[in-house]
Amino acid sequence: VNFEKDWWTCEDPCVRVRRLGEMTGKPECNFEVEYRPLVVVSEPKEVRLTITSVELGDYHYTLVLTSEAAASERALQFKAALGSSHVQTFRFRNMVQGGPTTYKCVYGNPDAFEIPTTIEAEAAEDWEGRDVMVTISFEPIALGEVRDTLRVVSDVGGEFVCSLYGNGVAPRPQGPFLIANGATKNITFKNVFNEARDFSFVVDNPRFSVNVVSQKLDANKEIALTIKFEGPSGDGASEEFTSGKLYVSCPELKALPPWIYYLRGQNTQ
């Protein structure tokens, strides 16, 4: 008796059938039936499996299929200072064959996480599927932890779930920014909050000056701060460099540590 692979069929593309071993000289042959649902099947549905042999004819079997939503087993951890971001990639496998599939990305906190609205997944080449990547950027707007859940959903490709854990930490010092004697340096500062805030700008060394003392910035807006360095003239410079710091603080948020920019003035021309 000869069972050829092309001679068994199933009405559901989520079912794969494989023959286990050869039937020659044996009274029976075993077949492995693998069910891999892509979407939730809450109500049991019946599909027909047909195994065909030239010598013995058709064998018909009824499969009763059902499935449940997958649990959220995957998680991504993010950590970034205010004013910076942390980017990671969430990977899932598209099992849909025959053409590209559009997945919708659903999540609840667009202020902290930046994720594409949709993802176009290329068609799977075979039963094993094709890897798809979603780029996730975490940019905190406050100190502390934030949690969210990403759901990547398609009517035909199913649903993939990932827990997102973000941790916003204090701004990290930046620099040093080298400034020649009598010259200026521009430093860009961004209001990372989702609402307008007042900011103050202070330098701790009188040889440095900043062009703005205070200013209100709209949400996610930037400002170019011009820092000028006036070093000692003539032979008055005993050191090659003069150090200083620029402090940027938000008076409304007194518990928030300031942004610190290290300045380095070059005394000699």
Image (cartoon, rainbow, N blue to C red):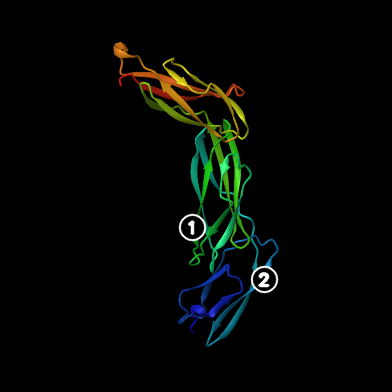
In the picture shown, does residue 1 fall above or below 128? below
In the image shown, does 254 or 212 lie closer to the viewer?
Answer: 212
Q: CA distance from mark 2 to mark 1?
A: 30 Å
Q: Can residue 237 be seen?
A: no
In the image shown, does 33 or 23 lie closer to the viewer?
Answer: 33
Query: Is disc 1 placed on a helix, strand or loop?
Result: strand
Compared across the picture, whether 259 is left or right of 43 comes to left
Residue 96 sits in quarter: bottom right
Q: Which residue occupies 62% across, 47% down?
A: 107
Would you name the residue on which mark 1 appears?
A: 131
Rendered-image quadrant of the C terminus: top left
Q: Can residue 213 be seen?
A: yes
Query: Is disc 2 placed on a helix, strand or loop?
Result: strand
Residue 153, position as x, y percentages in the image: 61, 56
In the picture shown, does residue 91 fall above or below 180? below
Residue 53, position as x, y percentages in the image: 53, 84
Residue 177, position as x, y percentages in the image: 39, 27
Would you name the residue on which mark 2 appears?
A: 46
- Of callouts 2 and 1, which one flags the residue occurring earlier in the amino acid sequence? 2
Residue 186, position as x, y percentages in the image: 44, 29
| Residue that lies at the very extreme toward the bottom in this rendered image | 55
Amino acid type shown at disc 2: Glu
Q: Which residue occupies 31% across, 11% down?
A: 236
In the image shown, does 156 or 50 lie closer to the viewer?
Answer: 156
Amino acid type shown at disc 1: Asp
Residue 198 sits in quarter: top right
Judge the density around disc 2: few (<14), some (14-19), many (≥20) Cα neighbours within 10 Å: some
